[in-house]
Image: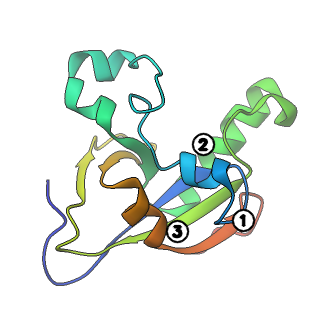
Amino acid sequence: MEVDEGFPLVVYEFVPTSDRSAAEFVDEFRSDKARGKGPSPREERFPDLHDSISAFRTFEDAHRRWKQIADRFGADKVRLGPYVARIELEPGQGFKYEDSEDPTGHLYVQGDPVKLVEAVADVAHVASVPRD
């Protein structure tokens, strides 16, 4: 779906650092396909999703997912970045999204990586108090 006119769609993405100019921060906004990673099982079923980044509907959803992994495997084993970027996807910028309606709040976002980085409104540590 295209991001509709009227108001931005706000989503949350795990990032490895709060430094927006760091190469690893910028790289996080490239799809797995663009980074040479293979598709997930869902992406194998729906190949267009492989051109997307994963995100969450709310900071709380992202926080909960990070905590689930940390509780199961240990905080030092979580491969998701320790920061969460709040991204405001403005209409007319070519952003698309697919809401999987997953109860975890997971969704997929497509867009130019440079524009996605420019759309980052805030970055907070995942351990911050959820604030939507």
Closer mark to the observer between disc 2 and disc 3: 3
Going by the image, does 33 lie left or right of 94?
Answer: right
The secondary element bearing badge 3 is classed as strand
Amino acid on which the number 3 mark rests in the picture = Arg
Amino acid on which the number 2 mark rests in the picture = Arg
Going by the image, does 22 lie left or right of 95?
Answer: right
Closer mark to the observer between disc 1 and disc 2: 1
Amino acid on which the number 1 mark rests in the picture = Asp
Q: Specify which label sits upstream in the sequence, 1 or 2.
A: 1
Q: Residues within 10 Å of mark 2 (few under 14, many from 20)?
A: some
The secondary element bearing badge 1 is classed as loop
The secondary element bearing badge 2 is classed as helix
Say which residue label 3 marks. 86
Above or below: residue 108 compared with residue 39: below
* The label number, if any, that marks residue 65 in the structure image: 2
Contact, mark 1 vs mark 3 (Cβ under 8 Å): no
Say which residue label 1 marks. 19
Above or below: residue 3 compared with residue 106: below
Above or below: residue 68 compared with residue 77: below
Q: Position of residue 113 (x, y in %)?
A: 41, 54
Q: Residues within 10 Å of mark 3 (few under 14, many from 20)?
A: many
Please give the name of the residue rendered at 69% of the width and 68% of the height, measured from the top-left corner. Answer: 124
Q: Specify which label sits upstream in the sequence, 2 or 3.
A: 2
